[in-house]
Image (cartoon, grey):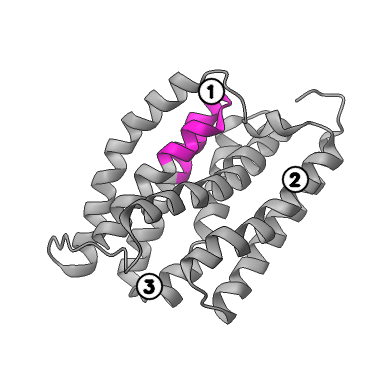
Amino acid sequence: MTAKVSKIRVLKYVTIYATYLIIVWAFYRFLFRLPDEIEELVIKPIVWLIPLFYFVKKEGFGISSLGFTFKNIFPAIYLAIGLGAVFVMEGVLTNFVKYGKLNFGANIGSMPLIMSFGLSFITAFSEESAFRGYIFSRLSFVLKNEWSANIIQALLWTGIHVPIAFFIWGYTLPQGIVYLSLTAIFGLGSAFIFGRTKNIFGSIFLHVLWEWPIILFR
């Protein structure tokens, strides 16, 4: 990204996009409960990605500004593996908080394991493109302060998970607070990797490593 594009315009676009995403996705969670396959393969790409690519086109930065590049891909993957080990422990902690003990019963429903795994990558693609590829990168560009941008996007990332925690998974308040705290930590870690490498694939891989312990152990 270059300074030729107005920071005010970029800030305007990222603010509109983030506000739209939080509000629309909250209403979706309140009003609908569709199968995961439909939600992740159809609804989320429409709601999350189409507006995102619209704003990217308006900015003129190009898809590479979202981190879709092979540059630094190996450092990104290595960092994801390292942080991923930490998030496995997060999943175990989430499990313990909910059940009061470790319950390792898988919670993937009737979907075959390989399909569940593939769906996780698709989910990660949509969510990381939106939050780390777009929101975080644009805030970093505007604020010129990576940690300020990281904290803001982590708060937004946590906020968009409030409806699923309480209205879909049915967490109690203490359970929800723990889950949302862990979600915020993941958001910070994912943006940290993106900030170091400017490569979205590390964040996508980390997302899968973070999500699967929660799926299996929640």
Pointer 1 residue: 197
Judged from the image, the secondary structure of the residue bearing numbered disc 1 is helix
Specify which label sits upstream in the sequence, 2 or 1: 2
Residue 6 image offset from top left, x and y in percent: 87, 33
Q: Name the residue located 82 percent from the left edge and 40 percent from the top edge.
A: 57
Give the label, 2 or 3, closer to the camera. Answer: 2
Name which of mark 3 and mark 1 comes first in the sequence.
Answer: 3
- Viewport quadrant of the C terminus: bottom left
- In this view, 147 is above or below 168: above
What are the residue bounds of the magenta stretch?
187-206
Q: Which residue is mark 2?
A: 53
| Mark sitting on residue 129 | none
Q: Is residue 76 magenta?
A: no
Which residue was labeled with disc 3? Answer: 169
**Which quarter of the figure is the N terminus placed in?**
top right
Residue placed furthest toward the left: 101
